[in-house]
Amino acid sequence: MKTTFRQIFRQANFVIGFSIITLILLVITIYPLFNPGSPLQMIGQGTFFKPGTYVNIYDSLDTSKVYTLRLDDAAANRIGKKLLPADRETMRAWLIAFGLPEESVQIEYTDDLLQLWWNSYDENVRPQGMTSAARKAAARVDAKLAGLYNMESLTITQPDETTGEPAQKMTVSETDYVNVSDIANVRVLPLGTDNFGRDTLKELLAATATSLKIGLLAGCIATLVGLALGLFAGYVGGIVDDIIMFFANLFTVIPGFVLLILISYSIGQESRGATTVAVVIGFTSWVWTTRSVRAQVLSLRNRDHVNLSKLSGHSLIRILVTDILPYIASYVVMALILQICSGILSEAQLSMLGLGPKTTEVPTLGLMMFWGMQYTAHLNGAWWAYFPVIVMIALISFSLNLMNTGLDQVFNPQLRS
Amino acid sequence: MTEQAKPLCLSGKGVTKIYGFGDRRVAAVDHVDFEFRKGELISIVGESGSGKTTLVKMLLGLTSVTEGEVYFLGERRDISSRKKLRTYWQGIQAIFQDPFSSYNMFNKIDTVLLDCINMRGGRRLPREKKIEMMTEACSFVNLKFAELTNKYPFELSGGQMQRLMIARIFLLKPQILLADEPTSMIDACSRATILDMLLGLRDEIGMTIIFVTHDIGLAYYISDTVYIMEHGKIVESGSADDVILRPSAPYTRRLINDVPKIHEPWDFAARRPAAAEATN
Ligand SMILES: Nc1ncnc2c1ncn2[C@@H]1O[C@H](COP(=O)(O)OP(=O)(O)O)[C@@H](O)[C@H]1O
Ligand SMILES: [Mg+2]
């Protein structure tokens, strides 16, 4: 037993898979401690906020401490943001008419464009072939640039408490900065928000926890049902075997997923909780566990140690539990891991079809995909709403399968290299 | 004859076992009649595949009998319920061919022996008494219980495992023991020890041994009555002297010819089927 464990933990595949799963479990348990609150709380008004650090504007004006930073690129960034494409075209037209070679004027590079402009523009120059309207437009852009370069402070006023008259409160200059740690309301949204304005990272971790629970419950049900039926079908044989295999065949001809869809549909949106979905998945996916357990039992039931156990007067249950089960236990563990994995995937598939758990109760990986799709996150470029979910699903199923391969190599001596 | 006076303990009429159906139909045991008498050592001899193990499993009630009747202690055997089977198994026990697959490798050796005590109604005995019984059984087969306790079967050698199987029979004290090639997987040195122990056990608790083997020389050496089995049929039976010294069936003669004799050169020609046919 001990040596088996040591062997398992020497399997690179198993160790990698196990580490990933452990890491995921650690993160989903620890993260909510630092970021409490409901993962379904809609904090953003609007859909798909970009990932980033969100600072309250009012608080940032109100901070006691203001730092002055003279950053050239900050000014260029600000001007670059405010210089519209139309303005840039106007600048380009003027510069080319002024006589600069066409290839030297590139409107994407704000710094270079401004450099050329300051060097060349003169409102009194009248380049050849320019309409007066175009010249006036150029003059307007020049005025706008002058405005953007103005370093004068903004004055902020507030009604006076006693008189109610507007009174100067403070001035804000272009070079004034605040440190986000001085601000009361800073919200970091590493993965932005989803279509409902929920914190995507928080939702993702909560969804992972729920999906793992669904997978675990579905996997346990499928494995237990499959194991029990497989044991009885294989060991008892005869009519019991015929009846069980009849149902197993029935479930094989009707694809499990179709059955799953039909059952989920008939349960109805309102009564579909995460547990219900897990139970339904579990009870529709026992078939192949049954088949493979039965095959293993068939090869075990005529072994002499089983015969001897019968001769010692042991009951059916006792023989199944002590003489058959231990021999297939490693196999059952492997089947369980695969069933957990397929349970998670089934939930995702069901939810993508809109047949998953009720949305208002818990987030699941499948539901996140579903809503991302409904609100066309992929067309809006809101990758944070669906891509991390795909990565998480892939990571879970990758690591579970890796663990399984590792176990297989320990338990199947033929595979050992 | 004195042997006819001994009471029957196990007998069968037209016992048949058919595996599969259609093209794959195999009559593993084919209308076999036998009468095993109390206190005797009966050998069933046949080459591998002749249906010996199948017959043993049927006699034990581990597989169903396709056709025919088995009589236990003179009465028709009734094993229709689990309770009746349990009672039946108090009277008839077995040792199997392969000691390595006879043990549940997840159970300690103590479990094997304790099960026997429990089966004999000793479930409520005090612990010391149980240990005393297990120690006695082990010492009967030259094993030390103190060294075996808390060990797993795979920590033993094949010979030790088979001896422990005999210790099991010692505790169970059945009326009939079916030993299915108990020495064929054991090295020659341990083989004699195990045979001695089996014979000793027979004298100790007075049981009937049905000894299944492919070794006709061994059968002659230990048994009172010999049954020869070929392709599921019994082709010859009788006292060991009658069958082996004066064989009537050609199959028996072939089996006897196949035994290597230390003092004679190995004669290939005589062993070829054509040559064997010609001598008949
Ligand atoms: N469970 C089974 N299913 C089908 N055929 C079997 C089975 N067990 C044994 N047989 C067949 O029955 C015949 C007798 O086998 P067996 O009783 O094991 O012979 P022996 O013990 O004399 O070597 C063989 O031909 C074997 O292939
Ligand atoms: Mg055999």
Image: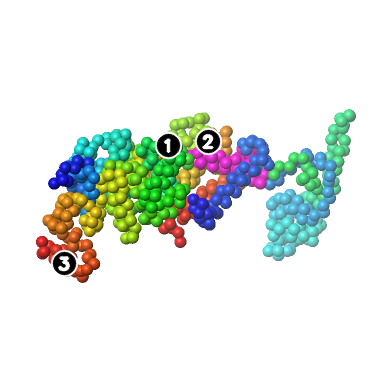
Q: Are marks 1 and 3 on the same chain?
A: yes
Q: Amino acid at mark 2?
A: Ala
The mark lying in front, picked from 1 and 3, is 1
The spot of residue A55 in percent (x, y) is 74, 43
Relative to B260, is A181 on the left or the right?
A: right
Q: Residue B125, which numbered label?
A: 1
Chain at tag 3: B
Magenta span: chief secondary structure: helix
Q: Are marks 3 and 2 on the same chain?
A: no
Q: Secondary structure at mark 1?
A: loop
Residue highlighted by disc 2: A274
Start and end of the magenta stretch? A189-218
Residue highlighted by disc 3? B270
Q: Tell me if B195 is positioned left or right of A61 in this view.
A: left
Cα distance between the residues tagged 3 and 2:
79 Å
Q: First in sequence, mark 1 or 3: give its number.
A: 1
Evaluate whether label 2 is on the same chain as label 1.
no
Q: Secondary structure at mark 3?
A: helix
Q: What amino acid type is highlighted by mark number 1?
A: Leu
Q: Amino acid at mark 3?
A: Ala
Q: Which one is in front, A139 or B101? A: B101
Chain letter of the residue carrying label 2: A
Q: Which is more toward the observer, A199 or B9?
A: B9
